Image (cartoon, rainbow, N blue to C red):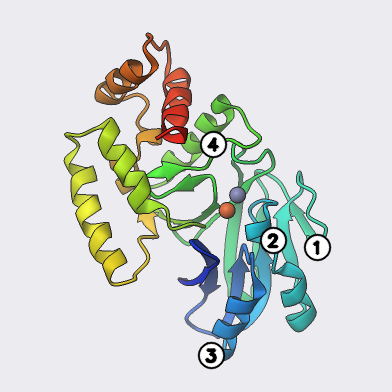
Amino acid sequence: MKAIPVPAFNDNYIWLIQNPKSSNIAIVDPGDAKPVIKQLEKSGLHPVAILITHHHGDHVGGIRELVSKYGMPVYGPGAENIPDVTNKLDDGDKIVLQELGATFDIMGVPGHTLGHIAYYGHNKLFIGDTLFISGCGRLFEGKPEQMYHSLGKITALPDTTEIYCAHEYTLANLGFANAVEPNNKAILSKIKNCKQRRELNLPTVPGTVNEEKQTNPFLRAHVPEVIAATEQYAGQHLNNPVEVFAQIRSWKDNF
Ligand code: ZN
Ligand code: FE
């Protein structure tokens, strides 16, 4: 299974999932129909499904136009009010996309929004705005403990899992990660690598679960250096990883 990025707006990625054996694809989080249609017409790809992770406009804005042009089912979180969703999904569900030859497990990952879901299959995770490469989504609706638990579901996946998020925020996230852990060599080498990719206008997405565990401060609330730096930022002793995580989130919000 292949994932093709379609850049949209300033820094969004709309992912096209393609089985290389056919020209059928699924579209993940089409916030805008125009760049998707352009890409489909250019490459002769045929959309068979839309997969939605959460209700924000930059993820759902293009659904109606795509459905009226191509006609296809729209999968999305059952717990969120997204009018064009035809197949409502919840944590633990499984979807089979026959025309794509693909199967995805649905993971509930609340935090950024309360009904946010992710699609996991074929060693790939389509995570929307829950986790970004070396960062995580803002807590617009959920509580820190919810997001901490959601991120734990991601780190429980195999190390080689490829993570496809919906925004190109990596370099800014790594700048913050470097401030939290100035001596973390994995972060320093990832900065170098991602700078080169951005200079060539290449995406820094996907990352892998293993890379994220080494470089993403939001997945490192249990690491002594991260705890020490975060306690210094907070000016207080922090009692558990959720408290550390909450302070890292507020530190990043003000960074
Ligand atoms: Zn969002
Ligand atoms: Fe977004």
Tag 1's secondary structure? loop
The crowd level at tag 4 (other Cα within 10 Å; few <14, some 14-19, many 20+) is many
Q: Which residue is mark 3?
A: 42
Question: Disc 4 versus disc 2: distance between alpha carbons?
Answer: 22 Å
Question: Disc 1 versus disc 2: distance between alpha carbons?
Answer: 9 Å
Q: Which residue is mark 2?
A: 60
Tell me: 79 left or right of 178: right
Identify whether 7 is placed above or below 244.
below
Tell me: 109 left or right of 199: right
Answer yes or no: do the residues labelled 1 and 2 have beta carbons within 8 Å?
Answer: yes
Q: Which residue is mark 1?
A: 84
Which kind of residue does numbered mark 3 sit on? Answer: Lys
Q: Residue at x 30, y 47 (%)?
A: 211
Q: Is residue 116 in view?
A: yes
Question: Disc 2 versus disc 3: distance between alpha carbons?
Answer: 22 Å
Residue 175 spot, x, y in % from top left: 30, 43
Residue 131 spot, x, y in % from top left: 48, 45
**Toward which corner of the image does residue 230 lie, by quadrant?**
top left
Q: Earlier in the sequence, mark 4 or mark 2?
A: 2
Answer yes or no: do the residues labelled 1 and 4 have beta carbons within 8 Å?
Answer: no
Q: Earlier in the sequence, mark 1 or mark 2?
A: 2
Q: Earlier in the sequence, mark 1 or mark 4?
A: 1
Which kind of residue does numbered mark 1 sit on? Answer: Asp
- Mark 1 or 4: in front is 1
Q: Residue at x 39, y 60 (%)?
A: 205
The crowd level at tag 1 (other Cα within 10 Å; few <14, some 14-19, many 20+) is some
The crowd level at tag 3 (other Cα within 10 Å; few <14, some 14-19, many 20+) is few
Q: Earlier in the sequence, mark 2 or mark 3?
A: 3
Which kind of residue does numbered mark 4 sit on? Answer: Ser
